[in-house]
Image (tube, rainbow, N blue to C red):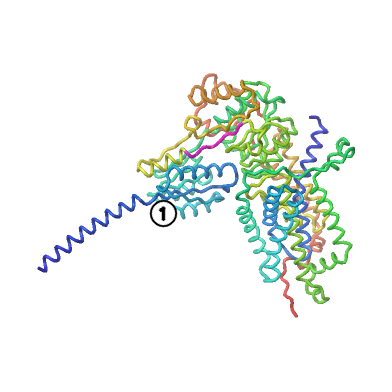
Amino acid sequence: MDGTDIVVSAALTIITAATPLVFAALGELVVEKSGVLNLGVEGMMVVGAIMAFATGVTTENAFLAILVGALSGALVGGLFGFLVLVLLSNQVATGLALTIFGIGLSALVGHGFVGVTFAGVPSLYIPLLTDIPIIGTILFGQDLMVYMSVAFAIGIGWFLKSTRAGLILRAVGENHDAAHAIGYPVIRVRFMAVLFGGAMAGLGGAYLSLVYTPLWVENMTAGRGWIALALVVFAAWRPGRAFFGAYLFGGITIIQLHVQGVGWAIPSQLLSMLPYLVTIIVLVVISRDSGKQRLSAPASLGKIFYAAS
Amino acid sequence: MHNFTIKKSLAALVVGGLASMGLVTQTLAAEPLKVGFIYVGPTGDHGWSYEHDQARQAMQKELGDKVITTYVESVPEGADAQRVITKLATSGHGLIFTTSFGYMNPTLKVAKRFKKVKFEHATGFKRSKNLSTYSARFYEGRYVIGHIAGRMTKSNVLGYIASFPIPEVIRGINATVIAARKVNPDVTVKVVWVNSWFDPGKEADAAKTLIDQGADIILQHTDSPAPMQTAEKRGVWAVGQASDMSKFGPNAQLTAIIDNWAPYYIERTKAVLDGTWKEKDTFGGFKSGMVKLAPYNKKMPKDVVDLAESVRIAIEQETVHPFQGPIKGQDGKIIVKDGEIIDMGQLLGMNFYVEGVVGSIPK
């Protein structure tokens, strides 16, 4: 295998490592933009993973599996929405509980699916285009979900910036009392955002169990939900940056493995730490201007909304 | 009369007492022994904890209604472990297996408090009157696998996915390399540390990386079947860890090292039932059946299968030791002299790479 081949296959591995993070981070970004902090991303992801896998194995239909992954993530997100938006429970505590609940529930559902294998999601193949050396497979040889993640990144950016609905969502997240006073349905907007966030986390989980490693093992998300949460802050609540952050994180994760394989004398613990370290450094660099950073965070983030009459 | 009544009632009391005591002993004998297990991972990890739980079930099946087994899974190593072990000890368990290295100190503490309860700790080295330790010589399996890998590789590069730089893992890497270079002096081994026992995504990434860098056989010392699955997809060989992983790599799996704890669990539980249990240290390998190999891949040439079997039998009969000199370090210096066998201290505390490993041990 020569140099370019290694670069191409490293790029392919980076794409698979980044895609679940793109889904989960974009979903959480929309949720936070509406002023809700959902720390249960990990829980929604892992439920999405098992439900998608179970559907994929029983029906052998990859598209249905992806859909069920998204729906089940949304369902768990809806539970969170009901608790924090209707019953006004504490968002941080409820989010943490949601993670624990998701891990437990997925283990219970997944009991019969340990050791079962799934064929995976087919990859795109366009004659000629996919055959172009180097960029062919990278651009035109991915599975459906990778293209979905790119589409979502662009779509969410456009939605938040250029649509009226996006503006309302941001208004609710910035100042829910003012939005309420004007007459926007704060709770309903937030509930929809939470459902969307859940569906995206479910897609991230589905990517893990259908494409990344097409199998089910308990707790297979292994902390990716938490990384997605960090990426939202890293991205200063901007979809484009969240996408970039996910690829940066995935890229460094894969490159450190390559460095180890070559046998460079760098402590592996340091290398494993590197993706997190770089995330923190970039975070520090982009938020040097603390005023600007404060401006980018939704002002009502995590605050409970009391619909005063 | 009065006196007589007292005597009579006293006698009745004594007889009654004796009878009831007899009754008590009888119920004691009939009452099953409660045996508790704690696992570091979920029983569904399809690796380490999975095999411990399989052994628990085998023991339950063998001893039937003489025992009741309970288990607690995914117990973090540390303070939580002590709480869980104490809970098992106070809820009537007579024998408790704690199955991860990090449970060592919590187990010792609880064992000191509950002298009547018997404890068994896996992979540790601290013992007391009611605390035994047990572990397996996985390196014996690795040594056989090294022979197979050395013969089966075409690129002469083996890829090794490692968890944490502890002696047990380093011993496995070295045993593999020593064996592989015996049958094929050109073999080198690339090691990638993922700093986790269990992260399917990362393990798969590590496998892809090693394959991209030219490895055509993937070996793993992490617990998920993800590397096996990746090897299957990419069309290279792989060796399973802790459990038969052929379901995940029907074409890729050459064989797998299987942890077989069942005979030990049955033996030790029987010993408690018979009252013959004594604290001891067990370090079992092929000979005691604690380490086994999964069936060889059908595509392996017959001479490679024969070689693997002859090595396995030689280890079993103790005519061959994986760490028999001459063993050279990475710098080419002799570590174990020709004909000598590595001493136990060096074996248990192994912290060096042998010749043929690429890279250095993370410090």
Q: Is residue B103 left or right of residue A289?
A: left
Q: Which amino acid lies under the numbered mark 1 shown in the image of this protein?
A: Gly
Above or below, comparing residue A79 to residue B341 in the picture: below
* Residue A194 position in % (x across, y down): 74, 63
Query: As rendered, which of A56 and A214 lies closer to the eye?
Result: A56
Kindly report the secondary structure that dominates the magenta region of the rendered protein.
Answer: strand
Whether residue B126 appears in this view of the structure is yes
Question: Which residue lies at the image location 78% right of the left edge and 38% below the top edge?
Answer: A10
Residue sticking out furthest to the bottom: A309
Question: Which residue lies at the image location 80% right of the left edge and 58% below the top edge?
Answer: A236
In the rendered image, residue B256 lying in the magenta stretch gets the answer yes
Q: Is residue B205 left or right of residue A242?
A: left
Above or below, comparing residue B340 to residue A301 in the picture: above
Q: Count the numbered circles shown.
A: 1
Residue sticking out furthest to the left: B1
What span is in magenta? Answer: B255-262
In the rendered image, residue B296 lying in the magenta stretch gets the answer no
Element assignment for label 1 = loop
Residue identifier under label 1: B92
Q: Chain of mark 1?
A: B
Whether residue B363 appears in this view of the structure is no
Quadrant the C terminus of chain A occupies:
bottom right
* Residue A82 position in % (x across, y down): 69, 68
| Crowding near the residue tagged with mark 1, few <14, some 14–19, many ≥20 C-alpha atoms within 10 Å | few
Quadrant the N terminus of chain A occupies:
top right
* Residue A293 position in % (x across, y down): 80, 60
The quarter holding residue B270 reads top left
